[in-house]
Image (cartoon, rainbow, N blue to C red):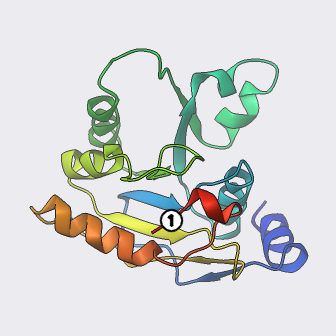
Amino acid sequence: MKALARFILYTLLGWKTVGSFPKDLKKYVLIAAPHTHWLDFPLGVAIKYAEGLPANYIGKASLFKPPFGFIFRWLGGAPVDRSKSNNKVDAIVDLYNSRENFILGMSPEGTRKLIDPWKTGFYYIAKGANVPIVMVTLDFGNKQAKISEPYYLTDNMDEDFKVFYNYFKGIKGKIPENFNL
């Protein structure tokens, strides 16, 4: 699977990765942005397999229904019912606490539409699970995914978000007008 993903991503599509995912960390939150188009998902999956990353993701529950739901599970996904007002952050923190290895890939925007400011769930998940955040750009302008070093949260949320926004500043999504930092 890795060789096929590398061939598709790097040879056929002409993308490249800059940096590498941490090999020594068993748990972290991975945020990938910008999320402006449905193509971001298959791109993220291609990066996951090309780089040999054992990442998981969550998605809206409707994606996991027949006839294609099994594909999303096979790709590492878990459904989330967004219509219920249960505490998703606590549930995901519990996942981190119950597993020896867990990497969760998320979109900090939480949607493909233009959103400002970003959602904060990924931040509270990382804070609650006491894990770092690794940032990945989905830069369609340069056809590259840039991978950050792990970022360990401080006790200053505003300053942490400045670091995140700075990292993604100037990145072009598939639909550039849906992302503006």
Q: Is residue 90 above or below residue 140?
A: above
Element type at marker 1?
Answer: loop
> Type of residue at label 1?
Asn
Tell which residue pokes out farthest to the top in this image: 84
The residue to which callout 1 is attached is 180
* Residue at x-position 58% and y-position 46%: 113
In the image, is 68 to the left or to the right of 128? Answer: right
Front-most of residues 52 and 132: 132
Whether residue 67 can be seen here: yes
In the rendered image, residue 53, in percent from the top left (x then y), is placed at 57, 62
Q: Quadrant of the C terminus?
A: bottom left
Judged from this view, the residue extending furthest toward the front is 177
Left of 150 or right of it: where is 128?
left
Could you tell whether 165 is left or right of 43 in the image?
Answer: left
Residue 151 can be seen, yes or no: no
Which quarter of the figure is the N terminus placed in? bottom right
Q: Position of residue 46 (x, y in %)?
A: 72, 61
Residue placed at 27% from the left, 64% from the top? 161
The residue closer to the viewer here, 118 or 90, is 118
Q: Quadrant of residue 79?
A: top right
Residue drawn at 62 percent across, 65 percent down: 52
Among all residues in the image, which is located at the extreme right?
12
List x then y, in percent, for residue 65. 70, 19
Classify 10 Å Cα crowding around label 1: few (below 14), some (14-19), many (20 and above). Answer: some
Is residue 127 or residue 139 the one in the foreground?
A: 139
Q: Please state if 129 lies on the left or on the right of 31 as rendered.
A: left
Residue drawn where x is 60% and y is 47% of the image: 112
Q: Position of residue 34 (x, y in %)?
A: 56, 61
For this rendering, which residue is in front, 26 or 71? 71
Q: Is residue 168 above or below residue 118?
A: below
